[in-house]
Image (cartoon, rainbow, N blue to C red):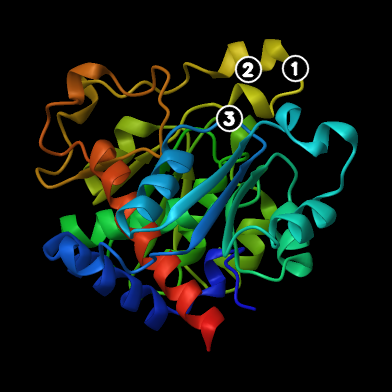
Amino acid sequence: MRSLIDIIDLSTGELDELIGVAMDIIEHPEKYSESCKGKKLATLFFEPSTRTRLSFEAAMYELGGNVLSVTGGATSSVAKGESVADTAKTVSCYADIIAMRHPKEGAALVAANNASIPVINAGDGGHCHPTQTLADLLTIYREKGHFDNLTVGFCGDLKFGRTVHSLINALSRYSGIRFVLISPEELKLPSYVKNETLKKYHLPYVQTTDLEGAMPSLDILYMTRVQRERFFNEEDYLRLRDTYILTPDKLRHAKDDLCIMHPLPRVNEISVSIDNDPRACYFKQVLNGKYMRMALILKLLKEAQV
């Protein structure tokens, strides 16, 4: 049974295929309006979510399917101590495909290993978030037309930012990619990501604390929030949360065709005064996420029937 746990589960050919289907959905939505008629998606979200959960549900409804939803561990048998494995086996009796978010790294893999239907990782702790990466890739493709030869800056929480880890893994497979890693010392990219991806594939990267100094070279600027829920110490969070705030003044030396991205939700790391800047793409990412999740659901359900 094919599931999606990590973005590297998909080849670059499969990423191109998904982007192609998403682009066709954008152009011809009526073609897909009954593609999942009679199918059910179970959304199991044991962490708070707005965009990811709703986009999965909107995706399934727009494909003509239905949704079964669990939000928060307190409303499910997890509160009684049920394991992820047993939950996956149970939900497999009711639905055709699962999208799951869980605070513990590896939970989605456990679910996939025990479910009899496809499982999509909708975020597992600080590990990875492959469908956000699909949204990110479609956004880059629609804005730039390609993935090769781009300088991509990641700014903010690179330590706990699962969206950052997933996108680095995805982009690392394209030629000419350069990474600029902008963060405070305490929130630097984890060593395992550097060792298993950047160093392993000899990818050029720079680590810096200077956002404005890095700005002129960037084709993509991927902002992230400092995630309060990942900190054990409230004082550390309060000290670091406002390290980087993107304002119009900080963009004065940026490229005219810079693509500004953010997985959302934002707190205050991007000023609302940037929202009307034509380079702001973070709300486009939200819509692109729905299209890519539609394409992914179609792919996994089709493969499950083979």
Q: Which residue is mark 2?
A: 237
Local secondary structure at mark 2: helix
Instruction: Please name whichever residue, 264 or 25, is drawn nearer the observer in this view of the structure.
Output: 25
At horizontal 76% and vertical 22% (from top left) the residue drawn is: 232
At horizontal 63% and vertical 17% (from top left) the residue drawn is: 237
Q: Amino acid at mark 3?
A: Pro
Instruction: Please name whichever residue, 20 or 189, is drawn nearer the observer in this view of the structure.
Output: 20
Mark 1 neighbour class, 10 Å CA radius: few under 14, some 14 to 19, many 20 or more = few
Q: Is residue 100 above or below residue 225?
A: below
Local secondary structure at mark 1: loop
| N-terminal-most mark, 2 or 3 | 3
Q: Which residue is mark 1?
A: 233
Seen in the image, is 5 located left or right of residue 131? right
Task: Residue 205: give x, y in percent of width and height.
Answer: 46, 57
Task: Residue 19: give x, y in percent of width and height.
Answer: 29, 69
- Marks 1/3: CA–CA distance: 20 Å
At horizontal 77% and vertical 56% (from top left) the residue drawn is: 90
Q: Quadrant of residue 177?
A: bottom left
Q: Is residue 32 above or below residue 192?
A: below
Q: Which residue is mark 3?
A: 48
- Marks 2/1: CA–CA distance: 7 Å
Instruction: Please name whichever residue, 174 or 64, is drawn nearer the observer in this view of the structure.
Output: 64
Asked if the residue under mark 3 is in contact with the one under mark 1, i.e. CB atoms within 8 Å, the reply is: no
- Marks 2/3: CA–CA distance: 19 Å
Q: Amino acid at mark 1?
A: Asn
Residue 106 in sight from this viewpoint: no
Seen in the image, is 12 located left or right of residue 190? left
Quarter containing the N terminus: bottom right
Local secondary structure at mark 3: loop
Asked if the residue under mark 1 is in contact with the one under mark 2, i.e. CB atoms within 8 Å, the reply is: yes
Task: Residue 112: give x, y in percent of width and height.
Answer: 71, 65
